[in-house]
Structures are given as structure tokens and as C-alpha cells.
Image (cartoon, rainbow, N blue to C red):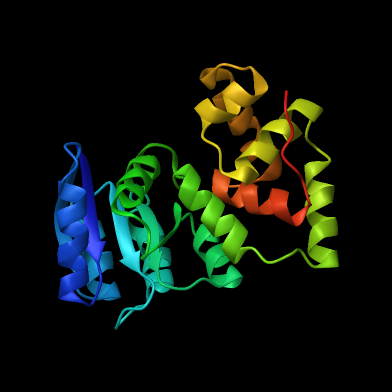
């Protein structure tokens, strides 16, 4: 079972998220929090796998709570829930080890997929990743693009192809099908890519690929 903490200052939002998540047979909402400070304490004291944090909360906002959870309970994967998106907030969240962003207007099944993905490999489900990258990552400024291309120069041609598909939001299985590789092989490539680029997770790498202007390619 994936044990989940839901943190939002609105009781109806918490209740709705609980109802959606508990409809999945492998997810259990074990705790709720009404503000960021309570979320940090609950993550520290409770056996939780994934924490869903609203970005707008009293006491501590979602991004500040994320940083605190990363410090006191690094085992917990964190998804930030938001109704809006700003690139700097995305980068700040990912820089603190967050699993990614999830928009509150996502479909119920998307929420379930995102929690499962975050629990397993610290990344958003493909559709959510595409939405985050396409909507929140503005066109790269010249300096940022140059820096991204410099970092990507460390990758092999095949690693660049895999990274481009991460930027498109594909899962390991879908990327493998596109490149005629096994899912296990793609997972190995992803691990190498994250190490070479010094990225904590695949969403960071996807944003870097977009900054560099890397386009998806076939096998």
C-alpha cells in the first residue's frame, strides 16, 4: 500500500482527494494536515510514502513545507498541488527533491497515477509531466538555453534520444517502445542521464531538455 498524507487548508478539498485516492486498491490516505507546519510534523512522525501539499497554505506554504519535509523526512516523496504554475516555483520545488507538480484540475485518474509514480520513481505520470513542462516551462532565455546545451553535451546520442522522450513526458515503457528498447534498458539510460546532468529526478531533466531545445526523436 502507498501511504499518503494530504495537506490542504480546505476540508472539502481534502475530503475530495481522499475519496479519489481511496478508490484505488493500492493507496491509503493515512493522515491529513490543515497547514504547512502540521504537514511537516505529520510527515516526520507518521509512516508516509507520499505527501500531497497544497502550494497555498497558512503557517508554511507548500514550497517551504516541502523543504522542511526534505530535511526532516527525506524518505517522503512530495507532490505539490496547485491551481496555477510559475516556473520558479516548479524549479524551487524540484530543487528541494520534490516529485513534481500536480494541477488541481487534473482528472481523478491522473491524481492516482501521479501518486503511484511519485511513490515508485519520483516523477509525475506522463500526462502530468507533459502538462507541467509544456505549461509551466516558458521558452528558454538565451543564457539558460546555452547552459542547458552545455550540460547536455556530456550525453551520448542515444542518451539524448531518451532524454528528449522524457521531455515529451513518456514513461519508460513508452520510451522503450519508441526507441525499440526494453523498459529495463530505458531505466538504465535514465539513471545514467540523471547522474550526468546532476538532476534529482526526471522532471528536472525534462525541463533541462526543453531549455536546451531538445526535440523528441525516433529510434
Q: Nearer the viewer, residue 63 or 84?
A: 84
Is 125 placed above or below 175 here? below
Asked if one can make out residue 181 in the rendered structure from this viewpoint, the answer is: yes
- Where residue 201 sits, quadrant-wise, is top right
Residue 1 or residue 75, whichever sits in front: 1
Q: In the picture, residue 104 is in which quadrant?
A: bottom left
Residue 139: x, y in percent?
74, 64
Residue shown at the point (85%, 57%) measured from the top left: 146
Looking at the rendering, in which quadrant would you find the N terminus? top left
Report whether residue 47 is seen. no
Residue at 65% of width from left, 45% of height from top?
198
Q: Tell me if 48 is positioned left or right of 133 in this view.
A: left
> Image point 37% across, 47% down: which residue?
114
Q: Could you tell me residue 90's position as x and y percent? A: 54, 64
Q: Residue 22 at what x, y percent from top left?
A: 15, 48
Position of 182 with respect to 180 (left or right) is: left
Residue 44 drawn above or below residue 203: below
The image shows residue 152 at horizontal and vertical percentages of 78, 43
Amino acid at each position: 500500500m502507498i501511504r499518503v498524507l494530504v495537506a490542504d487548508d480546505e476540508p472539502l478539498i481534502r475530503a475530495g482527494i481522499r475519496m479519489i485516492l481511496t478508490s484505488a486498491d493500492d493507496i491509503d490516505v493515512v493522515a491529513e494536515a490543515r497547514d504547512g507546519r502540521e504537514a511537516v510534523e505529520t510527515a516526520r512522525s507518521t509512516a508516509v510514502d507520499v505527501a500531497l501539499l497544497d502550494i497555498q497554505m497558512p503557517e508554511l506554504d507548500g514550497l517551504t513545507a516541502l523543504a522542511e519535509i526534505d530535511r526532516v523526512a527525506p524518505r517522503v516523496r512530495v507532490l505539490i498541488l496547485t491551481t496555477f504554475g510559475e516556473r520558479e516555483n516548479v524549479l524551487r520545488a524540484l530543487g528541494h527533491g520534490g516529485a513534481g507538480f500536480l494541477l488541481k484540475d487534473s482528472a481523478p485518474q491522473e491524481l492516482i497515477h501521479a501518486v503511484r509514480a511519485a511513490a515508485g520513481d519520483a516523477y509525475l505520470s506522463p500526462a502530468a509531466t507533459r502538462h507541467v513542462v509544456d505549461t509551466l516551462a516558458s521558452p528558454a532565455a538565451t543564457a539558460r538555453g546555452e547552459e542547458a546545451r552545455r550540460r547536455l553535451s556530456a550525453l551520448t546520442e542515444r542518451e539524448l534520444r531518451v532524454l528528449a522522450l522524457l521531455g515529451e513526458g513518456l514513461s519508460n515503457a513508452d520510451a522503450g517502445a519508441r526507441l525499440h528498447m526494453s523498459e529495463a534498458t530505458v531505466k538504465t539510460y535514465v539513471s545514467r542521464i540523471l547522474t550526468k546532468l546532476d538532476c534529482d529526478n526526471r522532471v528536472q531533466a525534462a525541463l533541462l531538455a526543453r531549455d536546451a531545445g531538445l526535440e523528441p526523436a525516433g529510434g
